[in-house]
Image (cartoon, rainbow, N blue to C red):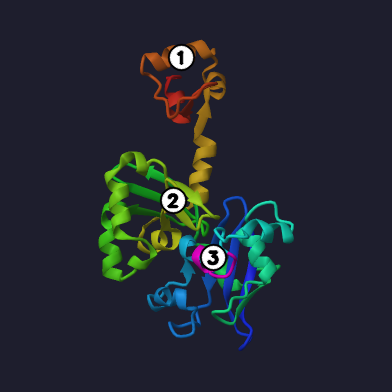
Amino acid sequence: MKAYEIRDYESEENVGVLLYYEQEKNFIIELKDALDEWTAPLLFSGFVKSGIYTIPRDISLAWVRERVIPSGRQNINSILNQHRLKEYDEMKLLELSEGKCSQDSLYIRKLDELPAYVSERMSRNLVDVTLLSDNTLLCFFKDDSVKRVRLDLLGNVMLKNKVEKRVKINDIDKIIRNEKLYNTAKLGADGYFLTFNNSLDIPASLLYDVGKKIDIKFSEVLEFVKKNIVDTTESCDILGCTRQNISYIVKREELPVLKHGVNGNLYLKGDVEKNLW
């Protein structure tokens, strides 16, 4: 991850931070809380007016593209050759121009350390999400909290709290109606969002705000997994038997399989130990 301070060269005020995730080529902009709809960059004024200071990746990318040479420019290959670039790279072009643009007085400057307000917000990013039945998400956050989010109720909560700018309600409906799309869920950009098919994003901040907190910590869930999930080899050791015996017990439905694998399965330790009785 690269981090850049966004500054105004006229007032020398710090506007926010631009984060760039090189592997995914995703941009995230974190704006300072002190901004309002009049002092925020024009593209973000609607978000700030709604109290949203973590800008989604598509809008952050749009801000970057406002400040670099477009990929469709007629002489783009000559420009890339002039700057010794093998391919079009928005981040490298942004660095070359220092993020300056004729439309405003903003520029970027490399950061070695993230500001406290950015680190604090990132503590509410996702570290994992489990897809449950009935379009329910079990969300694990960096601050060790665990929250349950029902997608079918998310639209109503968004309208009630006027936070719909973070995600379109009809996008939520698409996810709910399409099980195949729902099962493509994965984390993006350091847990800043949960993405479906890498095209429909739900920000972690929204899931954090609307989720129903569960009285358990992510670290406790990990401890449970470490102590209570065993593979086929460990099951053989517990029961003092061979892999063939384990297969036989499974076929007799005396040992439920948590997850099937090519080289072995995973089981609950308690289920394995029941076969000692």
Left or right, 108 with respect to 210, comes to: right
* Magenta highlight on residue 151: no
Left or right, 140 with respect to 212, comes to: right
Check disc 1 and report the residue beneath it: 247
Q: Residue at the spot x=45%, y=85% of the render?
A: 38
Amino acid on which disc 3 is placed: Arg
Q: Residue at the spot x=39%, y=49% of the render?
A: 138
Q: Residue at the spot x=73%, y=61% of the render?
A: 82
Residue 123 on image: x %, y %: 53, 62
Q: Decide: marks 3, 1 in contact (CB < 8 A)?
A: no
Q: Which mark is residue 65?
A: 3
Q: Nearer the viewer, mark 3 or mark 1?
A: 3
Label 2 and label 3: CA atoms lie apart by 22 Å
Amino acid on which disc 2 is placed: Thr
Q: Nearer the viewer, mark 2 or mark 1?
A: 2
Check disc 2 and report the residue beneath it: 195
Secondary-structure class at tag 3 = helix
Sequence-wise, which precedes: disc 3 or disc 1? 3
Classify 59 as above or below 22. Answer: below
* Front-lying residue, 90 or 159: 90
Quadrant where the C terminus lies? Answer: top left
Residue 219 on image: x %, y %: 53, 50
Left or right, 145 with respect to 179, comes to: right
Residue 83 can be seen in this image: no
Density class for disc 3 (Cα within 10 Å; few <14, some 14-19, many ≥20) is some
Secondary-structure class at tag 1 = helix
Q: Nearer the viewer, mark 2 or mark 3?
A: 3
Label 2 and label 1: CA atoms lie apart by 37 Å
Q: Quadrant of residue 159?
A: bottom left
Classify 47 as above or below 11. Answer: above
The residues colored magenta run 61-69
